[in-house]
Amino acid sequence: MNLRNLFRRNTFEHGVHPQEHKELTSALPIRRLPFAPQLILPLSQHAGAPAVPLVKPGQEVVRGEPVARADGFVSVPMHAPATGRVEAIQLMPSARGPKTPSMLLHVYEGSGQEVLYGSTRDVQRMTPEEIMQAVQDAGMVGLGGAAFPTHVKMKPPPEHTVDTLVVNGCECEPYLTCDHRLMLEQTASLLAGIEIVMRALGVGRCMIGVEDNKLDAVAAIDRLLPADGRISVHAVQTKYPQGAEKMLIESLLGRRVPTGAFPSAVGVSVFNVGTLTAIGELLPLGRGVIERVVTVSGTGVQHPGNYLVPVGTPVRFLLQHAGATPRANELILGGPMMGMSVASLDVPVTKAVSGMVVMEENDTGAGERPVQPCIRCAWCVEACPMHLNPSTLGLLASKHEYTRMAEEFHLNDCFECGCCSYVCPANIPLVQYFRIAKAINREQAA
Ligand code: SF4
Ligand code: SF4
């Protein structure tokens, strides 16, 4: 297929165009990181109930062995990323802030990369229910950053009929290129994962959306597509937040997900390329998620790259390998638009961490841009992909009118993309206000 035919200006309304900075790592192949001497495995690396430990302190485990079980349907198990001994189960710092129950694994010096647990199986012969169970058993969560248990997404509400699997290969956050490398280097696993999920969902159509700054990935996927036309790949406009599932559905299918509804309401299920690649690779081998690809980038690292990192690796260890520059002063887990700035280098890489962006002092602008009063320019309104009014929401937040924000101004439709804060000339930290408002509303509702 001619690439020109694939290139259409598929897009959504509003959004922003931050500097991409992807050139730092997009051409760097995935490299394996060695084991840290100690891994920190939070029992809650996913949305839903925390996993329940299956092992006790002092117990030896082998790489790939289940070490915690799922606690109910909306939960996933955990597997040992390395061979070693469980040291303790205790509270440890997390990227979210509060300490969280975590399993500490002392890694044996001689621990090899070979996975010692799991046995091969014929996924083709598995029923949709068996696939869903296998996906849960693998501890699979949305590896794009959401960390929502994947098997739950494979079971849409009975009142909705899903007809299309949408695959998110946009990777619209600046700096991040791990999905780009996966699409280039593990294309066959991605397509295998797509076939598995299509069977589990019972859908006959799959559309893969890739931003048009990654046409080499579009071409790599296009070369391996089956000839029957069930699966297609589409270049979508490079614009943030193209990778948000509601935006991507609008770009590819022209369907709008109603307020407060999930994509299944418009007949769609959205999966990230990282998740599908992991499913395609791990399910036939009967293995769990024990490592993931993380982009390490930013002006504050000497050796940026895409690293295959064991889950539980402390960011301090990752930073040592990437080499922090003397002026590095801010570390963000995820991308700079939606990621979290972390205060402790003892927090681990979890299944949800797609990137580690390290910035130098002058790049963060910390303390250089004072917050000014709103000048009613409406740039935030123009930028908001959810068609909200961030200016009014910001005003209400400053008056602590959080309930009104939700009831009259659709605060809960905000998915914290940060476009409004990004464009605001008055430097009002709008998205931070909205996070706080939502947290307070949640607390009051509990
Ligand atoms: S953070 Fe929320 S309000 Fe701001 S642009 Fe994004 S969706 Fe709109
Ligand atoms: S972009 Fe900032 S200054 Fe402009 S209307 Fe929105 S909140 Fe006010």
Image: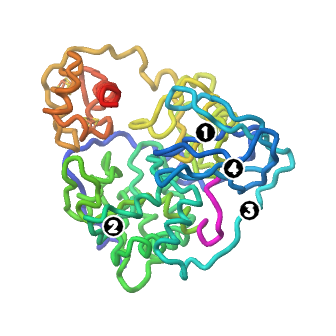
User: What is the magenta range?
Assistant: 282-290
The quarter in which the C terminus is drawn is: top left
Q: Are marks 1 and 2 in contact (CB under 8 Å)?
A: no
Left or right? Give the position of 99 relative to 81: left
Element on which disc 4 rests? strand
Q: Position of residue 270 (x, y in %)?
A: 36, 60
Sequence-first disc among 1 and 3: 1
Q: Which residue is mark 4?
A: 67
Q: Which residue is mark 2?
A: 234
Left or right? Give the position of 173 relative to 141: left
**Which quarter of the rendered image does ligand 1 occupy?**
top left
Element on which disc 3 rests? loop
Quarter-of-image position of residue 230: bottom left
Q: Position of residue 390 (x, y in %)?
A: 20, 31
Sequence-first disc among 4 and 2: 4
Is 285 contained in the magenta span?
yes
Quarter-of-image position of residue 282: bottom right
Element on which disc 2 rests? strand
Amino acid type of disc 3?
Answer: Tyr
Mark 3 or 4: in front is 4
Amino acid type of disc 4?
Answer: Val
The circle on residue 423 is none
Q: What is the spatial separation of the Cα atoms under label 4 and label 1, in whole angstroms? A: 12 Å
Q: Position of residue 294 (x, y in %)?
A: 57, 47
